[in-house]
Image: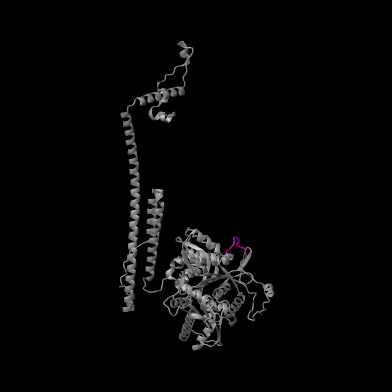
Amino acid sequence: MGDFADYARKDFDKKKNVVASADKNDQKDVQFNVEDAKSFSAPEVAVPDTVVNTEVTAPVVSTGDTAVALGRGLDVGTANLVSSFQDASGNVNLKIQRNAFIDIDCDDYTRNMLTRLGVQYVVVNGRMVVVGDPAFELANIFNRNTRRPMKEGMISPDEADALPIEKMLLETLLEQPKTPGEICYYSVPAEPIDADMNVVYHQGVFGGLLKGLGYEPKPLVEGHAVVFSELAEDDFTGIGISCGGGMFNVCVSYKSIPALSFSTSRGGDWIDRNVASVLGISSSRACGLKEKGIDITNPNGREEEAVEIYYRNLIAYTLKNIKERFESSSSMPKFPDPISIVCAGGTSMIGGFTEVFKQEFEKINFPMDVKEIRLAEDPLYSVSKGCLVAALSESV
Amino acid sequence: MKPQRDGDWMSSSFDVPEALQKRVSTIAVDDLAKRGMRTVKVLDKAAILSLVDEAVEQVVATRLQNLDTEDRDKIREEAKSQFKKLVAERNSHQKEKQQAYEDRIENLRAQAVSLEEKLVQAESAKEEFARQAEEQTEASASEVLNPAVAPVPNPVIDSDQLKEVIKEAVAEAKGDTPSSSDAQMEGLKASIDALASKVTSGSSSRGSHSTGSKVIEPPTEEALVALFSKETGEKIENNLDQVEVKNAKAGGVSANLAKLKNLRKETE
């Protein structure tokens, strides 16, 4: 535990401010209002013309000092869990939890130190299970791999014991429903086209879990959630791609109706595994390397080059699969106008992703006219926000 | 040795008050007067008991002084042998209890070993079945579905029943177990529980592979809701409510929502 003690001392000052105080009502988020923005000399941004009716809101329920709209969004991702709700002022509030954990020795010192550091833990079978981002940090320090409740977009058969932990994480992220049977849309992967798996079990387990929490669960394929979140200006017409840790999920939508949805079974984890393999490091460390803020259009050094090579390969692989699927599908709509492709998800957040995507896109003869390829406004939150839109639209 | 001056001691050997009661005669005061007795000397019961005590003390003291060495040794030996006999009886009783307890532990250990063996058998049977299924798949897709493929004779292990039996056995064994062995029993119970869990997961994984495909049969919605709604009664230690998860705010979705609702109205 010496390493961890050093780590704890080093990070204590940095992180102690995030420890929840006894008073849960303390506002911890930094929020800026219009006055704050003006004082920062922030440029004024015109409201887009497409905002047709901002008065439309979902039913609101008051809970003491706060009021929130009924309806929840939940992104059940291989790498991250993201919940969202809309507050009375129309802001989307999100809670994010890394979908990973690591088990360490359990003793009183560690127990106290973790709480002081703001690190979440659960004690299971006498072992202390650190959950969330700190699990990644600890894994990197000890050069171990984190344990992952999900694999390739679905519940991992290797970590069936993680379900109780997953349930507790969701309870923390979603809290209790404001009213019994509050609608919660949760993301599910579409059927993969390159793997012999189906989503029925995964969907059923999370549906049951949410129902157990008191919600009315409704599944939404990830790509469709991206469409709801990012393609409102295009009348929800276009292609939404969720670039996740376990999979890439694709949805072709016409006026909010999904015409074609599928997934491919390679994602950010595939890059991590391969980079780890060629560099001789753990997957968790490879993930840390990937997320440290590199630009794949301008890789520096052997490690970044490895990341760039596998990113490019993953994008090319995904585009090839999309093209083949589109060409073989009889249900593809004929769009009258060129469409947009929007990429979302944590794997799309690396520097230069869109540029590499465009480069690889140019190499194939894509069977549709595309007017733009862009990144989602909030790539990591896009799926959860899309689920929230779906939930709010049904909460009447 | 000074005799105790209480009724219990008296009653255990010779009940002086009762003896007095039996032997006294009652005469009316008038009768005494008729006999010409004008005064009587009265000795109360406590005084009599006290006198008896004193008399006994004196006699015992005198006799002990008169005891020769041989008698003293004899008395000491008798006392020793009596004491040893009592100790032996007590030890024998405890030994029996200990033996019974150890037998129970041994029995439970045997059950655990048996379970372990069954688990190993189940796993090897599972592997064998997977291998057979693979061979069948290669040979012919239709043969895989052929009901002639004999199911692997898995040992039937009802984990709930098993756990129940073990719990009862452990509870029974604990009932008259010395407290110093509680930790041992708990350890054994935990290992048996863990083993039973292993058997359970082994059984469930057998079930998931029994189709010879990666596709897992989904449980019913009722089963899932029951699973995740079930209160185990055990509080899992955690600090999730003490530590705030990462929060963020993102741009509103009102515009998207309005657009979606308008679109739906148009299509209706």
Q: Is residue A159 left or right of residue A60?
A: left
Q: Quadrant of residue B4?
A: top left
Where does the image place residue A93, in percent across and percent down from the top left?
A: 59, 70
Q: Is residue A143 left or right of residue B74?
A: right
What is the magenta segment's predominant secondary structure?
loop
Q: Is residue A35 left or right of residue B48?
A: right
Where does the image place residue A27, in percent across and percent down from the top left?
A: 62, 65
Q: Quadrant of residue B116?
A: bottom left
The answer to which of A289 and A373 lies nearer the viewer is A289
Residue pushed farthest bottom?
A: A365
Where does the image place residue B165, in percent across and percent down from the top left?
A: 37, 56
The answer to which of B9 and A144 lies nearer the viewer is A144
Q: How many marks?
A: 0
Where does the image place residue A365, in percent across and percent down from the top left?
A: 49, 89
The type of colouring in the image is one colour
* Magenta-drawn stretch contains B59: no
Task: Name the residue at 69% across, 75% down.
Answer: A38
Quarter the N terminus of chain B occupies: top left
Q: Is residue A119 visible?
A: no
The answer to which of B102 and A341 lies nearer the viewer is B102
Q: Is residue A9 visible?
A: yes
The answer to which of B155 and A25 lies nearer the viewer is A25
Say above or below: A109 vs A361: above
Say above or below: B82 vs A196: above
Q: Identify the magenta region.
A: A19-26
Say above or below: A12 vs A252: above
Quarter the C terminus of chain B occupies: bottom right
